[in-house]
Amino acid sequence: MKISIIGAGNVGSTLAAGWVKQGHVIFFGVRDPNQRVSASGAKVVSVAEAVRSSDIIVLSVPWSAVPDAIRAAGDLKGKIVLDATNPLLPDLSGLDTQGGTSGGEQVAKLAGVPVVKIFNTTGYPNMANPDFNGQRATMFYCGDDANAKSIAAGLASDLGFEPIDAGPLSQARLLEPLALLWITLALKQGLGSNFAFKLIRRREAT
């Protein structure tokens, strides 16, 4: 599968490295195509060229850069956007959303195409290795398009996550605070990055 990632930071580079190992073709869309990225096997091009190169677009930029990134992408018609961003305030004290909406819903409004919120509820080290003593970390996702969600779940599974459908895109209003909880535990409560959320099921009695 051809996947274009807008943004070549820690999250984007880690996702790319994992998908390259699974045989996917990765394009990085960045402002400076001469920029060096850490994921070998990925092609670095302009944002607009990356969007033209594949039907799956991963948005992995700081929240403040989202409007410019979507403008630089150009025509997104026929594309699927996987939104890995979080609308964090600069001091990580809360979310930069108003009116009961979510960052994911704002991305969908700007992009005008199906959006799946995913790859936002854990840190990039866990995207490199979501295995915790034989248990797969949970990757929640949400969206309004069934085909887009199926593709997103498959890509999460390729990385080793257990993908869990959290419902429509409006559920990003829950997933983004969950991301803030992970960040708070990791950075402010001293847990570090070596933990992840896991949905646990009880075995039914036989």
Image: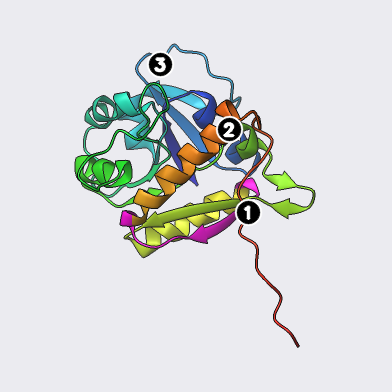
Dividing the picture into quadrants, the one containing residue 188 is top right
Provide the secondary structure element on which disc 3 rests.
loop
Q: Which residue is mark 2?
A: 124
The x, y position of residue 47, in whole percent, is 33, 26
Q: Which residue is mark 1?
A: 198
Marks 2 and 1 close (CB-CB < 8 Å): no
Q: Nearer the viewer, residue 2 or 150?
A: 150
The x, y position of residue 82, in whole percent, is 40, 45
Marks 3 and 1 close (CB-CB < 8 Å): no
Q: Is residue 182 visible?
A: yes
Provide the secondary structure element on which disc 2 rests.
helix
Q: Nearer the viewer, residue 6 or 1?
A: 6
- Residue 33 marker: 3
| Disc 3 packing (10 Å; few <14; some 14–19; many ≥20) | some
Residue farthest bottom in this picture? 206
Residue farthest front in this picture? 189
Give amino acid for label 1.
Lys
Q: Is residue 46 left or right of residue 15?
A: left
Q: CA distance from mark 2 to mark 1?
A: 16 Å
Front tag of 3 and 2 = 2
> Residue at (61%, 38%) from the top-left corner?
127
Front tag of 2 and 1 = 1
Vertical placement of residue 95 versus 161, above or below: above
Give amino acid for label 3.
Pro
Q: Nearer the viewer, residue 5 or 1?
A: 5
